[in-house]
Image (tube, rainbow, N blue to C red):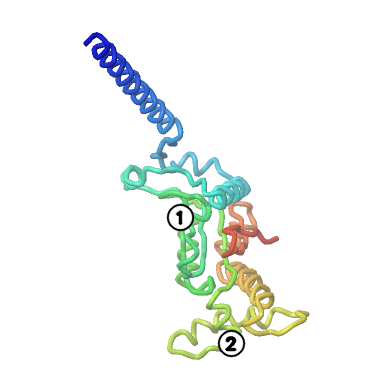
Amino acid sequence: MKKINIYISVLILVFMFSCQNTADQSQTNQNTFINEVKPLVEKVLTADEQAALTPDKIIEMLKSGNKRFMSDDLTSRDHSAQVRNSTFGQYPKAVILSCLDSRVPVSDVFDRGIGDVFVGRVAGNFVNVDLLGSMEFGCKVAGAKLILVMGHEHCGAVKSAIDDVKLGNITAMLDKIKPAVDLVSGFEGEKTSENDAFVHEVCVSNVNNTINEIRINSPILKEMEDNGEIKIIGTVYNMSTGEVMFLN
């Protein structure tokens, strides 16, 4: 009987020690989890913060954000709080013109939150009067300091322009992109949509042509750029890596 009592006592001690270790490990795991979780960003850009920014500073912010996107280190944000905090005003940093393509998540690509950037989208990232008016509002009225035109690799609209596709309203849309095809000169190789190198050259040409169209057709934005109030720049998004290449 004495041996049985000793055996039971040992079992109780082992059980208590095991429970304590489990509790300690659980607390350690909880503390580790708390330390690893980043605090959610709730605030949105204010008028004073927007006014203090320069076009070059915004470009550096976008470059840094793209690096975070590529390394899967996006900023944790409380979107519900940002929605509430931006209800009565907006003071974005930039206007970004992107292709319609669903594979290009514009805000995520630059790690931007609610109220950070205006985003205009159209297949082939060209400009028309509506987009120009939107850009003028974004910069002249709402205070954005940068216009960024972003094309992307393997663009279906660019390939369709190269192939001279004819289909409904798509035909008229592609007419806005076709000048970029003609502007590619000195290219050695097949000038077809099957040649990725040629598609890339047309993509870059289209971005640069869009920038020229902005300057030609919007005296307001051209004057703001000449006065150093804004910059107008071009980029190309790499579909394979998530990297945004900034053009000269």
**Residue 188: % across, % down:** 77, 81
Q: Give amino acid for label 2.
A: Asp
Is residue 88 at least partly visible in the picture?
Answer: no
- Residue tagged 1: 141
Q: Nearer the viewer, residue 188 or 172?
A: 188
Secondary structure state at the residue bearing disc 2: loop
x and y percentages locating residue 32 in the rendered image: 44, 30
Q: Residue 165 or 197: which is nearer the viewer?
A: 197
The image quadrant where one finds the C terminus is bottom right
Residue in view at x 62 percent, y 62 percent: 234
Q: To which residue does mark 2 refer?
A: 163
Residue sitting farthest toward the left: 1
Give the x, y percent position of residue 215. 61, 67
Q: Is residue 132 visible?
A: yes
In what quadrant of the picture does the N terminus appear? Answer: top left
Q: Say above or below: 9 vs 224.
A: above
Q: Earlier in the sequence, mark 2 or mark 1?
A: 1
* Outermost residue to the top: 2
Q: Residue 12 in the image: x percent, y percent?
A: 27, 17
Please tell me which residue lies in front, 67 or 166: 67
- Say which element carries label 1: helix
Is 120 on the left-hand or right-hand side of 236? Answer: left
